[in-house]
Amino acid sequence: MKTSAIKEKIARIRAGGKPRVLDLFSGCGGLSLGFQAAGFEARAAVEFDPEAARSHGLNFHGGDKRHSVARDIIETHPEDLVAELDLGPVERAIDVIVGGPPCQAFARVGRPKLREIDAHPQAFKHDPRARLYQEYLRYVEAFQPVAVLMENVPDVLNHGGQNIAEEISEVLEDKGYVCGYTLLNAAFYGVPQMRERMFLIAYRRELEQAVVFPEPSHWLVLPPGYEGTRAVALKVLNGLFSQAHDYHEPPEAKPLLPAAVTAEQALGDLPPIYAQAELEAGNLKRGARRMDEIIPYDRRRKISDYARLMRTWPGFEAPEEGLRDHVIRYLPRDYQLFARLNPGDQYPQAYQHALDLLAEEVAKRRRKGETLRESSAAYEKLQKAIVPPYDVSKFPNKWRKMWRDQPARTLMAHLGKDSYSHIHYDSEQARTISVREAARLQSFPDGFAFCGTMNPSFRQIGNAVPPLMARALAEKMMEALKATRKQEQHVGGRAAAAV
């Protein structure tokens, strides 16, 4: 039955049918959007977070309640999913499975906290989120897709001495797939963000295709921190990579390619928000933001090729009346400080600027005759109103002012708690980025809607795979699915030997 279903799927796709995609751990739908843009059908998704599930259902299924329900993959069996969504027999319902199991368990940044909780030096191994990739494989076994894509953080290659990507490849190969994985940076594929991630592709052997990753479309020199992340992920640990048969060297970006899309090219056409002026005018207050408020585009502002793409993405065109979700955080203490920051400044520099502001304010008040002793309650109140309270030694990377002429640094899900990691490059606006600006930096088009309030929207965006990165991968996978002969073999990988 399985062999027959697989052959039917391949024949249907090669006859011109759209490959049908199931997006697991879908979030709001970054992968789904990229695959849809490449000619795939976003047929179904499984997502645990309620707001993200509603966003996915709204954008890809017109708000159909069946597709907008939050589902726990551990509790939702494939047979239940196809029945609830009326997809037909499990083994014939889906052609391609994509998704990224939650990455927090694999990210080094989360391990100290886990150690504190469990008082065990290897506590991160026991985080149940690290086993969710096994649920992903359970869905692959049930649906028998002809192709698979998995995304995760680079540390999945070196997870407490385990190369999780290699382990997944071995399991998939035992199930009849040819596999390959690598590290790709989104900035090399037209995304205005330096986001490094692991991508694993697998094809059924019946396709007779080797795994090939997309060639970069853009070029830049990555900062040392990103090269360091890659080096840590690829570090040989107890012979870890002596058995990494399915690892592919990333395709090389070359200087002759167009320069990477910058933050200014991504955001420069959007209506400015002058935070301090909005605060003084009473337009910016504490409390929930109206996400449905329309802000007209400023027709006088220059539109880059990237911005034009974000406004005209087929099926997600910008609303004629203006922009939604262009809202920012209420941070009255910090707007004056943001204006002082230089591009690239992080929290240690911000803290020093704040001390300078405090000293200037104290001097000004003393010139007016006010007595301010450093130990006094009045001094401490003023200090609290100007200087952030975070320890410089513990939070060196908590803040960062973006460079105007570079892609942004990686957007994280932590945007849902604060946005200090992405302070707008424009000192006159002196603020953190808006929800819509975060979406732009992730390459979500202006017509893509996010459900929920500001914090959940930020979280959905930070968790997503950039749609342009997804589209590049999907286009390469479409070539393999439509091809009727073997592609050139990838030298040195198990994928070459298996075909």
Image (cartoon, rainbow, N blue to C red):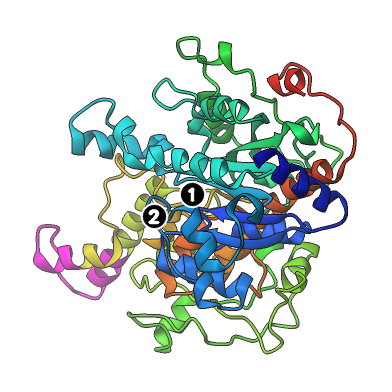
Residue 120 versus residue 407 in the image, above or below? above
Q: Is mark 1 on a helix, strand or loop?
A: loop
Q: Can residue 60 be seen in this view?
A: yes
Q: Can residue 217 be seen in this view?
A: no
The residue range painted magenta reads 361-381
Residue 107 versus residue 447 in the image, above or below? above
- Tell me which amino acid carries mark 2: His
Among numbered discs 2 and 1, the one appearing first in the sequence: 1
Q: Is residue 308 left or right of residue 82?
A: right
Which is more toward the observer, 230 or 304?
Answer: 230
Residue corresponding to mark 1: 345
Which is more toward the observer, 451 or 291?
Answer: 451
Q: How crowded is mark 1: few (under 14 residues within 10 Å), some or many (20 or more)?
A: some
Mark sitting on residue 174: none
Mark sitting on residue 353: 2
Label pair 2/1, CB-CB below 8 angstroms: yes
Asked if residue 365 is among those painted magenta in the image, a careful observer would answer yes
Instruction: Give the Cα distance between marks 2 and 1.
Output: 10 Å
Asked if residue 232 is among those painted magenta in the image, a careful observer would answer no
- Tell me which amino acid carries mark 1: Asp
Residue 33 lies in what quarter of the image?
bottom right
| Residue 244 rendering spot, x and y as whole percentages | 59, 18
Q: In this view, does 99 lie to the left or right of 446?
A: left
Q: What element carries label 2?
A: helix
| Residue 302 rendering spot, x and y as whole percentages | 77, 72
The residue positioned 42% from the left and 81% from the top of the image is 289
Q: Residues within 10 Å of mark 2 (few under 14, many from 20)?
A: some
